[in-house]
Image (cartoon, rainbow, N blue to C red):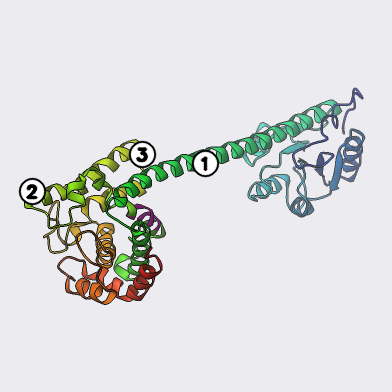
């Protein structure tokens, strides 16, 4: 039986805004002895708590699942399901596992207490107990539970702030890099839409190629997103090429072409500085591959390294087709624009020479979409 002591109010006060947002702390009292239930629930109500008496473990689990309490006072020795099993099942439920469980039992053995803590109990009170002890421990664990919840909310808020700041920083870096790419492109692109078009072309090619078995493990949604964002970086190295070469309306001399051929390396070096600071950034890493290798050719006759076949990164092989198609369709100071049909013919003739045959095949599945994008975004 319980031993009463001081009648001082130890519970109820300060609990108006508890963990669940209720006006009173909700205590589930579980005991198979009716007299114990009546006495304990009566005392707790007198201290300002909302109480729910439950006579066995099965009903306790049902009551907790239908309306989770703020704390559970749990007897151990009960028929059908004992207190240990009740507590174990509560801790296996994602919605209930954080509810503090205080065992109240006539078992005095140390092993009983160890088992109670092992299944997830936060405290253990032996019968007969003092009123002051029960109320003090109950209030302590309610406050701890409330503080834990508040801490979790603050941590979540902090994580959201950090993610927001990282996103803002990432967006700022992306804007800076793309502005540099746009600066390079604006020097020899009259429309300013080239970067926008190749983004769409590369996304289309990647999505289509990803449908075929050999590429399904490589071309993931992340790969498609990265190539969409990284494709505008392909000619970023042109920033370092002087206008007299970049904008020359006639054929370049051998010496001038050697200078022009340096822009893939210059672009990759520019992006490598960013990668040094953010080594896990897959978008920048793909941007380096595209910038450095998009002038390589499938047959090994490209530049700057003369790579061939699958030595060339897949992203650069797709970029090559997207870039050449758009370049063929565009008027430049040194050439007139080709029609869609003429451009398709040139790409077809370059299958297995300039271009990866698989990428060319994907292109021809998409060629009407390429034409549509090119005509809608001509200016």
Q: Is residue 265 visible?
A: yes
Q: CA distance from mark 2 to mark 1?
A: 49 Å
Identity of the residue furthest to the left in this view? 254
Q: Could you tell me residue 172's position as x and y percent? A: 44, 41
Secondary structure of the residue carrying numbered label 3: loop
Q: Residue at x 89, y 45 (%)?
A: 34
Image quadrant where residue 48 sits:
top right
Label 2: which residue?
A: 255
Mostly what secondary structure, the magenta segment?
helix
Q: Is residue 329 above or below residue 179?
A: below
Q: Is residue 43 left or right of residue 192?
A: right
Pointer 3 residue: 278
Image mark for residue 163:
1
Location of residue 218 in the rendering, given as x and y in whole percent from the top left corner: 32, 60
Which residues, given as a range, are shown in magenta?
Answer: 225-231
Residue 112 in view: no
Q: Nearer the viewer, mark 2 or mark 1?
A: 2
Q: Foreground mark, 3 or 2?
A: 2
Does the magenta segment cover residue 230?
Answer: yes
* Placement of the C terminus among the 4 image quadrants: bottom left
In terms of depth relative to the viewer, which is nearer, 103 or 305?
305
């Amino acid at each position: 039986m319980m031993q009463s002591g001081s009648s001082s109010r130890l519970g109820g006060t300060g609990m108006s805004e508890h963990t669940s947002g209720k006006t009173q702390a909700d205590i589930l009292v579980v005991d198979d002895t009716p007299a114990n239930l009546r006495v304990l629930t009566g005392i707790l109500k007198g201290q300002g708590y909302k109480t729910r008496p439950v006579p066995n473990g099965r009903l306790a689990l049902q009551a907790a699942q239908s309306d989770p309490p703020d704390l559970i006072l749990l007897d151990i020795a009960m028929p059908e399901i004992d207190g240990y099993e009740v507590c174990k099942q509560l801790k296996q439920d994602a919605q209930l596992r954080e509810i503090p469980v205080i065992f109240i039992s006539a078992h005095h053995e140390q092993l009983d207490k160890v088992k109670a803590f092992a299944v997830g109990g936060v405290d253990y009170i032996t019968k007969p107990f003092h009123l002051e002890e029960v109320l003090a421990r109950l209030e302590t664990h309610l406050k701890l539970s409330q503080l834990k919840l508040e801490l979790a909310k603050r941590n979540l808020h902090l994580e959201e702030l950090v993610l927001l700041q990282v996103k803002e920083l990432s967006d700022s870096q992306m804007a800076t890099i793309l502005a540099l790419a746009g600066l390079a492109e604006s020097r020899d692109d009259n429309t300013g839409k080239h970067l926008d078009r190749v983004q769409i072309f590369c996304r289309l090619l990647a999505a289509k190629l990803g449908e075929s078995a050999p590429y399904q493990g490589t071309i993931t949604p992340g790969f498609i997103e990265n190539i969409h964002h990284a494709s505008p970086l392909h000619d970023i190295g042109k920033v370092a090429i002087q206008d007299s070469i970049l904008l020359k309306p006639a054929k370049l001399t051998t010496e001038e072409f050697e200078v022009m051929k340096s822009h893939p390396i210059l672009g990759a070096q520019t992006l490598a500085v960013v990668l040094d600071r953010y080594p896990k950034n897959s978008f920048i890493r793909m941007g380096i591959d595209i910038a450095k290798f998009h002038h390589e050719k499938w047959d090994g006759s490209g530049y700057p390294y003369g790579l061939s076949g699958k030595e060339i990164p897949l992203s650069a092989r797709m970029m090559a087709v997207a870039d050449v198609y758009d370049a063929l369709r565009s008027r430049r100071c040194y050439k007139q624009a080709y029609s869609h049909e003429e451009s398709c013919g040139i790409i077809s003739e370059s299958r297995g020479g300039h271009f990866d045959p698989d990428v060319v095949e994907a292109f021809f599945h998409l060629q009407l979409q390429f034409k549509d994008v090119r005509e809608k975004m001509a200016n």
